[in-house]
Image (cartoon, rainbow, N blue to C red):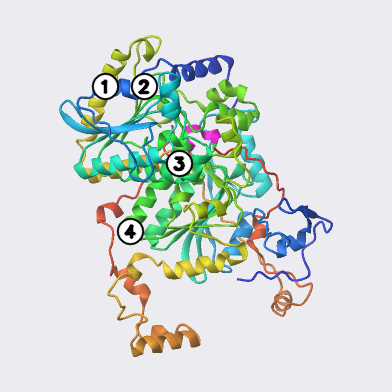
Amino acid sequence: MRIKFPLGRRDGPTDAWTKCPGCESQIFNKQLERNLRVCPTCGHHFRMSVGERIDLLVDRDSFEERDAGLTSGDPLGFHDQQAYADRLEASHIKTGLREAAVWGTARIEEHPVAIGLFDFRFMGGSMGSVVGEKVARCFEAAIGERIPAIIVSASGGARMQEGTLSLLQLAKTTAPLARMDVAGVPFISVLTDPTTGGVLASFASLGDVIVAEPGALIGFAGARVASGTVGEELPEGFQRSEFLLEHGFVDLVVPRAELRRTLGRLLRALPVAAAAGGAWPPTEERAWGPIGVLSDFAERLGGAVSETIGIDVQAEEENGGGPTPPASREAARPPRGGKAP
Amino acid sequence: MTAAPPTPRAVEEAWRRVQLARHPQRPRTMDLVSRIFDDFVELHGDRSYRDDPAIVGGPALLEGRPVMVIGHQKGTDTDSNIHRNFGSPHPEGFRKAQRLMRLAEKLGMPVVTLLDTAGAFPGPAAEERGQAEAIAASIKQMTALQVPIVAVIVGEGGSGGALAIGVGDEVLALENAVYSVISPEGCASILWRAPEKAPEAAAAMRMTAADQLELGVIDGIIPEPEGGAQHDPDATARALREALLAALGRVTRVEPEALLMTRYARLRGIGVVNEAEVEPLRPVDDGTLRQRIGRLLRVPGAPRRPRWSEVWPSGDESTDNEGGA
């Protein structure tokens, strides 16, 4: 999707410039937005809000938010220099979000997906009970509706203000992934700047495919944690996307302008298990026979014609032609909400 | 509970527990294993890179029945601490644990894990070999492991490095053990910007065994001898052994399918979530027909289609990281 920005932009400060941390050049804010918040000079990828991410990645008008009404409690009565509740409120005012992540269903290049997105400006994108709950529900919906899951991460890690309840979100968000393996539902993890700590040490590192934006900070220990705990500064240029690619922990480093198309390509190539099953070479759907050629041709002409020739991939999927998880596992839908301590 | 800074007494009490959990004479994993189990055979290596001495593990007998024991191992003096990296594992330590858990699964042996680490090692070498992936993979494996797991925090339960071998059907803690999402020093240096505020951070995070029981993160507390485990390692081991036998008695009685379902439900239920029915936000298109046509024809000045970036815009590029660990 090309996002068009017609000339008549909404009112706002017209004199706002942003200094690029990559090359120090001054960028006109409108130009930055037009360029998907990527520096036109050096290609530095600025952080994006959840809203901008949705506009960037999913088909127009396809995003339907779910579980919008989930909000955090304050289970520890946490207070540092500021009360946790006040920090939550400040983040809400700053971003318009109720929590650091949203999730919902959407389509990407026509493929239905369950997608979760983080916003780093909401308490550093940190994962507490609610963020963990949203991620887990996103995965469970992907299993239940047999659609791929995508999480776009941007997080400092587990939320300290909820103590070990946050730590346990690592397990809460990871447990559904084992079920997705059994169910044959793919998970694509998208890592953006920054993805560190507990989010990286759980679901974000476990994508069937892991995609990262260029130059994103991705690492287990944040520099401040590392220098505080170990007493040594991490070297410059360490923990960047390209470094992880080189060391085998990321599949693809994709510039922002290519991200949507890349996801579309992956979704085509990595369908949910039932659709991919069957004999090889495929004999029915899109085969090398005359019908296959015809339907391919018809698709290229107009799209939906293939359905009239009797090829209905969706129906086959639902009839469960491929491997299905054991009934008992499917039945193991957990209780919603949280047990209050 | 109202949010207020922890009282001086709470700070003192939390910090006392942290210091007991970190006590240099506190019995280490191997001290306990040798007192509790028979025929422990330590197995080495992750079959990929090297053996990480910060994690020990292998099969052993408990009351004549085989179990797989895995634990963090701190040193007892400077030399052994350097050898053990002060009990902070590298990725290969967690991968060794994964390998041992696979073996336990293959042979149908219950798994017992003993947690005692300040945290996974955060150094450059660990990052290079995928520390986060190693922890994540360990956690994932434990959430679906087909055999019962009992995890016991015996000293420090330091963040992801502890949880990586800490998912269990029952999770217990010794009385003076602590469990936290980040070290108090790390928390203090992020939220207070002052590592010396660690005692305050320890209290605020409510990391003592009693707090963890109250929060529902652990299922039980194993009493320690007066003054702490370091005063009587034998008595500590006896209490731990008793608790292990009881816990194993409970979890091994459950059918594997039910066990996994319960384990999943337990993890899924952790945390406090307020849920309200709200109308989800969406971009509002109040454009008139004329405006829409203008948009369609891309007339300059016509209002754009509503976009999600107007619902949740960017702005205020402050780089605060006031929550993550």
Q: Is residue A162 left or right of residue A292?
A: right
Q: Secondary structure at mark 3?
A: helix
Q: CA distance from mark 1 to mark 3?
A: 33 Å
Contact flag, marks 4 and 1 (Cβ < 8 Å): no
Dot 2, crowdedness within 10 Å: few (<14), some or many (≥20)? Answer: many
**Tag 4 subunit:** A
Q: Secondary structure at mark 4?
A: helix
Marks 2 and 3: same chain? no
Task: Tell me the residue that label 3 is attached to.
Answer: A169
Residue A164 highlighted magenta (yes or no): yes
Residue identified by numbered label 4: A183
- In the image: residue B112, left or right of residue B24: left
Amino acid, disc 4: Ala
First in residue order: circle 1 vs circle 2: 2
Specify start and end residues of the magenta stretch as a single range.
A160-166
Measuring from the top left, give residue B267's x and y in whole percent: 38, 41
For residue A242, which quarter of the picture? bottom right
Q: Amino acid at mark 2?
A: Arg
Mark 3 and mark 4 lie on one chain; the one further toward the N terminus is: 3
Q: Nearer the viewer, residue A11 or B113?
A: B113
Residue drawn at (83%, 59%), measured in percent from left and top?
A14
**In this rendering, would B28 be left or right of A205?**
left
